[in-house]
Amino acid sequence: MAAHHQHRKPRKSRQYPLAGSAVRTASALALVGTATATAFQGTAQAAPAPTPTQIKAEVDGLQREAKAAAGQHDRAREAAARERVALDGLRDAAAREVERLNTTRRLLGSIAAAQYRAGGSAPGLEVAFTSTPDEYLRRTAFAAHIGDRRAATVASAEQQAKRLATVRKQGKRTAVALRTHQDEQARHKATVQHKLTAAQQLLGARYALRVDRATGHGTPRAAAVAPTADPLTEPIATGAATARATRAIAYARQAIGKPYVWGATGPDSFDCSGLTRAAWQYAGVRLPRTTYGQIDSGTRIPRSALAPGDLIFFYSEVSHVGLYIGGGKMIHAPRPGENIRIAPIDEMPFAGATRPG
């Protein structure tokens, strides 16, 4: 029996999507515990304290994963919206088909009654009960007409029943797809919230480390960690911009300093694609809501041909977008916990660019 157990193959563990992300989140949360314990309990802990650079790298990774999950959430939301519209249309189509089929069935009932009344007796008796052969022929022709009409109506009813069955099948498939995308939407939303929470905790740990190193104890010194903001007076190279691009940049510029909020489209807060969409909408151009939708709108532009107003996309999964303002800079909504600002486009890996309009 022991030998039998020794040769049994181990059961393979089930693989789940975003496993790497889950590992990253777990390690990040462990890093939080280590960082905060070291910051507030001194150097007695055996584990070395993570550096602010290490914490920043973890935060950046978590926030990129959160943005990727947000993109998946948005795709699922848009798919669910399309399927909801399609399902409503199929329900209307099914109701129309039911009404047509009921009308045809009522017509069949009328035809059957008329045929019964017209053809209830044998042909020999028809001659006896008619005063002339012409009258008999008229009755026979009427019965034949009724028969042809009934056959055509039966065929129409069969086609209507088939169409109704097809519409109902499509409706069932669409309803299943809708539920699937709603579940995906909820799952990706939970992932985004989980990643952002972990990132915020890491940012708190980083703050604790900075306070500890700046003061030697746990009492905050605001001047040591005070954030800096981009001034609204920073020059923007818009000389080569079109009139519409100038309007889009002007809108984005007045949003500098407003907070990044996931899913926000203004006017008090924005996420990255919410800002670019609002800016270009102000200029009279309607863009898709999501980053992955915006990269497929407008004209693709190589990096060497960038002009003010172009949209610049970052990371291989196309999870971030900014509005180019010239001079190698952009206005963008960076991430949760940060405000809209001007930044160099080289601070993130370039994925592509488009020119709206």
Image (cartoon, grey):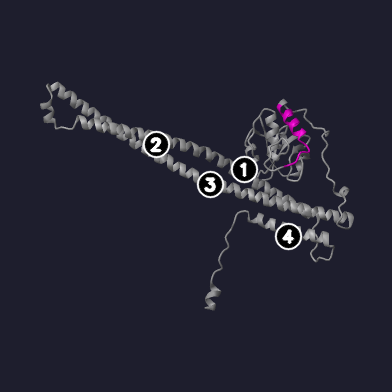
The question of residue 256 being in magenta is answered with yes
Q: Residues within 10 Å of mark 4 (few under 14, many from 20)?
A: few
Q: Percent position (x, y) of residue 285?
A: 66, 29
Q: Secondary structure at mark 4?
A: helix
Question: Which label belongs to residue 74?
Answer: 1
Please name which of the two marks, 3 or 1, marks the residue nearer to the observer: 3
For disc 2, the neighbor class at 10 Å (few under 14, some 14 to 19, many from 20) is some
- Frontmost of labels 3 and 4 is 3
Q: At 25% across and 33% down in the image, what residue appears?
A: 112
**Label 3: few (<14), some or many (≥20) within 10 Å?**
some
Q: State the extent of the magenta-drawn residues as a range.
A: 244-260
In the image, what residue occupies the spot 63% across and 35% down? 288
Main secondary-structure element of the magenta-colored stretch: helix
Residue at image mark 4: 30
First-in-chain label (1 vs 4): 4
Secondary element at tag 2: helix
Residue 145 rendering spot, x and y as whole percentages: 24, 27
Residue at image mark 3: 179
> Along the horizontal axis of the image, is 91 left or right of 26?
left
The answer to whether the residue labelled 3 contacts the one labelled 1, judged by CB atoms less than 8 Å apart, is no
* Residue 290 vertical position relative to residue 37 in the rendered view, above or below: above
- Whether the magenta-drawn stretch holds residue 230 is answered as no
Q: Is residue 81 left or right of residue 135?
A: right
- The amino acid on which the numbered mark 4 sits, given as a three-letter code, is Ala
Separation (CA) of disc 2 from disc 1: 36 Å
